[in-house]
Amino acid sequence: MELFVTNQSPQDRKFRFSIALVFIALALIMTPSSPVSMGLLFTAGVLLFNAISGTCFIYRVFGINTCPAPVTE
């Protein structure tokens, strides 16, 4: 069983990347080391990992796969 199986569509990955950038910007604007800014940075890190790797472990647990099927000839 592979650990990192791509299960996100390119649109899903772009959306997660965009939201992560917004969360990082919000965390930098807020008071440093506040619980909210730390939570935003943690969530942004998870979203960035998902966007870069194309793997969402929550999707995997529930059997969701938004990645388009490969074209077979």
Image: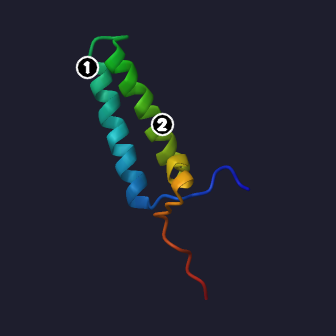
Coordinates of residue 62 in the picture (x, y in percent): 51, 55
Tag in front: 2 or 1:
2
In the picture shown, does residue 58 fall above or below 24? below
Coordinates of residue 65 in the picture (x, y in percent): 50, 63
Q: Residue at x 37, y 37 (%)?
A: 20
Name the outermost residue toward the right.
1
Density class for disc 1 (Cα within 10 Å; few <14, some 14-19, many ≥20) is: few
Coordinates of residue 1 in the picture (x, y in percent): 73, 56
In the picture shown, does residue 68 fall above or below 53? below
Circle number at residue 60: none
SS for dot 2: helix
Q: In the rendered image, which residue does mark 1 sit on? A: 29
- In screen coordinates, is 72 left or right of 31? right
Q: In the rendered image, which residue does mark 2 sit on? A: 46
Name the outermost residue toward the front.
62
Between 13 and 34, the one lying in front of the other is 34
Name the outermost residue toward the bottom.
73
What is the distance, in whole Å, between disc 2 and disc 1 at their CAs? 20 Å
SS for dot 1: helix
In the picture shown, does residue 7 fall above or below 44? below
- In screen coordinates, is 9 left or right of 55? left
Coordinates of residue 35 in the picture (x, y in percent): 35, 15
Q: Amino acid at mark 2?
A: Val
Q: Residue at x 49, y 60 (%)?
A: 64
Density class for disc 2 (Cα within 10 Å; few <14, some 14-19, many ≥20) is: some
- Residue 33: quadrant of the picture: top left
Q: Amino acid at mark 1?
A: Ile
